[in-house]
Image (cartoon, rainbow, N blue to C red):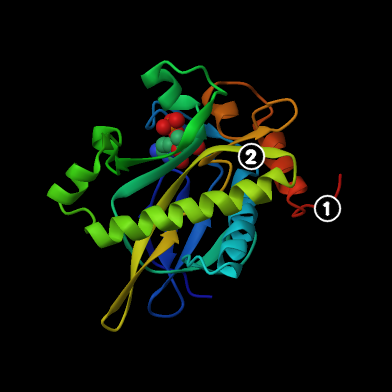
Amino acid sequence: MARRRQLYEGKAKVLFEGPEPGTLVQYFKDDATAGNGAKSGVITGKGVLNNRISEYLMMKLHDINIPTHFIRRLNMREQLIREVEIIPLEVVVRNVAAGSIAKRLGIPEGTRLPRTIIEYYYKNDTLGDPMVSEEHIAAFDWASPQDLDDMNTLALRTNDFLMGIFMGVGITLIDFKLEFGRLWEGEEMRIIVADEISPDNCRLWDSKTSEKMDKDRFRRDMGRVEEAYQEVARRLGILPEA
Ligand code: C5P
């Protein structure tokens, strides 16, 4: 096969030109960074696991009519996706206090929030992805009010659905990050879920023991990172029983 043209290299993934117009190939690396690049390392096998976990969850979302960029998995580390115009926002959905909200507002980690909270961050590495409000998003025209409304609805539906999937396998969905893209079909535009859904961008705690099964194990030097990702995949029924 002819070597594909690389379009973009991020911290954990690479995007290549796809085989047909309007498609891309998303390649999952084992590289991991935290603190906006302050800490970096390799989690052996992470790319393979995230490719499978994201495939599984995005296919489940498709089944309940939540549109995503996922088309099909190509091999161990690559998936075919729809090319979208990425909206420069990270949409974080929180059910339980952890990470930055725990620190910022002084809420002990593990405290259930009074209601689900959605936050927006402006995707900009140089600035360290600052948190922004709907006012900023409207003023700088990063997303229209309709786009934002669509993103909120999709984010909350995704949260309800993922919470159920994870609860069924003994995992609590603490929080997660979504990215969205605009997909043009002629004159029509739809907002769809893009990027990935994996232990890299979700906080997943064992429901019984509260053990962390996500990237916080890497961020906080807790060890057994790959094992935790593997366990998430195994519980979802993706890996054969050990
Ligand atoms: O660090 P913070 O508590 O704000 O993270 C909230 C959620 O968003 C976590 O699940 C984290 O993994 C995810 N996140 C991410 N990419 C970022 C920042 C946060 O996937 N750049």
Q: Say left or right for 31 vs 84.
A: right
- The amino acid type found where label 1 is placed reads Pro
- The amino acid type found where label 2 is placed reads Thr
Mark in front: 2 vs 1? 1
> Quadrant location of residue 128?
top left
Give the class, few, some or many, for how many residues have Cα within 10 Å of label 2's Cα (few <14, many ≥20): some
Quadrant of picture, ligand 1: top left
Residue indicated by mark 2: 44
Residue 110 in the image: state x and y as whole percent: 57, 23
Residue 194 in the image: state x and y as whole percent: 43, 59
Residue indicated by mark 1: 240
Residue 222 in the image: state x and y as whole percent: 62, 21
Query: For the view shown, which residue lies furthest in the bottom direction?
Result: 186
Q: Nearer the viewer, residue 239 or 212?
A: 212
User: Which label sits on residue 89?
Assistant: none
| Residue 184, above or below 103 | below
Q: Secondary structure at mark 1?
A: loop
